[in-house]
Image (tube, grey):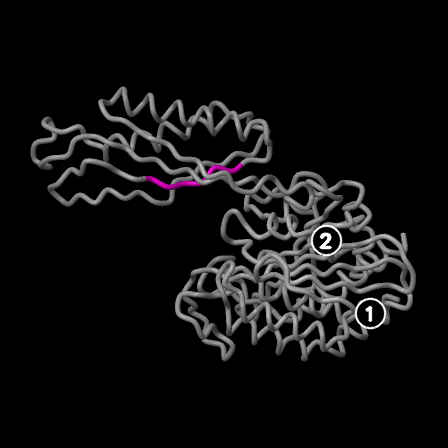
Amino acid sequence: MIREIKKLAGHHLDDFIAIRRHLHANPELSFEEHNTCAFILNNLRKTGIDEVKQVGRTGVLGIIKGKKPGKTILLRADIDALPVNTELQAGYRSKRKHVMHACGHDVHTTSLLFTAAILNRFKERFAGSVRLLFQPAEEKMPGGAQQMIKEGALEPLPAAVLGQHVYPQIPVGKVGFRPGKFMASMDEVYLTVKGKGGHGAMPETTTDPVFIACQLVIAAQQLVSRVADPKTPTVLSFGKITANGSVNVIPDEVHLAGTFRTLNEDWRQEALAKLKKLVTSVAEGLGGSCTVKIKNGYPCVTNNKVLTNRLIQLAEDYLGKENVLEQPVWMASEDFAYYGHLAPATFYLLGVQNKKAGIASGLHTPTFDVDERALETGAGLMAWLALNELQG
């Protein structure tokens, strides 16, 4: 079967490279993926998929039914793009200003369409069904996964949920797995620091919220360095500070925005409560005030250990042991996590790097690109994994 799958993946690679380039050139933001949705629906119908429908506003669910009833396997790809201005010079560069597939969701979508085409050729040889889930809005909280679940994408509950993500740190032709806790939870933190503005030459007449904000950023880091268990990965980063003063004007208030990430759900809640108490008390101690708004985001991605270890062995059979890498914890976040809270799930990484060809830019950068041979690896491997799970 491996030989058959690899032959199909190699033979049709150019067709799906063309599809990936179309999607890359025509990106759409979260819950705005109307044309992408229509394109996926049309492609699945042309492929001859048994059942295809639109779900989750701009998402798509396709079902491939085997020769007789059996277990259900769900395969997921996300389809949305990012608000990033492309700097690629390739002919398939984004046609839309400040919208780009800078996180590889065009590859995820294409790879799952490719997987669907392969699996559809094998449907007389397996029992059960494969659910193909093309999910919108992974990049924007609250994310599309919960919407898909709400609309029944996981009914009946699948025996396994599989997803993959491109990763520019891994060379093309290789994949990466990690059983257990893999990716971090993610919450957005918004602080508003209020003081009393005035002339920059007379700070004694003010309560400087810029100074207070700086102290809060520094003080908050003790949550990571002195309160968090060193064995629990924890990140607190503030990436945006808006003061709206001037070289000689101290403003009345300052706004900060940041992210808190960890791999322990109990510590996650405890840390956010401690953060609120810390920043409000420090601000008050310096004569100002601080209001805190937390937008709770995605939980941790936890790969089912039994399922993931089984898939690692299957991946080694398909790609060779040297091409299946053990991965460390990744502090990025993913709403794929919600599927794993309901059913056994595995989220793994697909190598897309080719340094000789200059393809090594990181995710979420304006120069991000992939070695498109990854489509052959990604689609073939996922088809192989799904077929084995159905037969197991």
Residue identifier under label 2: 162
Q: Is residue 14 above or below residue 348?
A: below
Check residue 336 for magenta coloring.
no
Residue 167 visible to an observer of this rendering: no
Q: Nearer the viewer, residue 170 or 198?
A: 198
222 horizontally vs 121: left or right: left
The residue lying at 44 percent from left, 65 percent from top is 99
Q: Marks 2 and 1: in contact by CB < 8 Å?
A: no
Residue at 53% in and 59% down = 103
Q: What main secondary structure does the magenta stretch of the protein show?
A: strand
Quadrant in the picture for the N terminus? bottom right
Q: Secondary structure at mark 2?
A: strand
Vertical side of 270 occupied by 66: above or below:
below
Label 1, secondary structure: give it: helix
Q: Is residue 28 above or below residue 223?
A: below
Disc nearest the viewer among 1 and 2: 2
Numbered badge on residue 277: none
Numbered circle sitting on residue 5: 1
Query: Is any part of residue 360 visible from this angle?
Result: yes
Look at the image and give the residue range highlighted in magenta. 256-261
Q: Residue at x 21, y 30 (%)?
A: 195
In the rendered image, residue 275, in percent from the top left (x then y), is placed at: 42, 27
Quick check: 257 left or right of 184? left
Q: Label 1 amino acid?
A: Ile
Instruction: Kindly identify the amino acid type of the residue bearing the numbered disc 2.
Output: Leu
Q: Position of residue 224 (x, y in %)?
A: 47, 29
Is residue 297 toward the left or the right of residue 74 in the image? left
Q: Residues within 10 Å of mark 1 (few under 14, many from 20)?
A: many
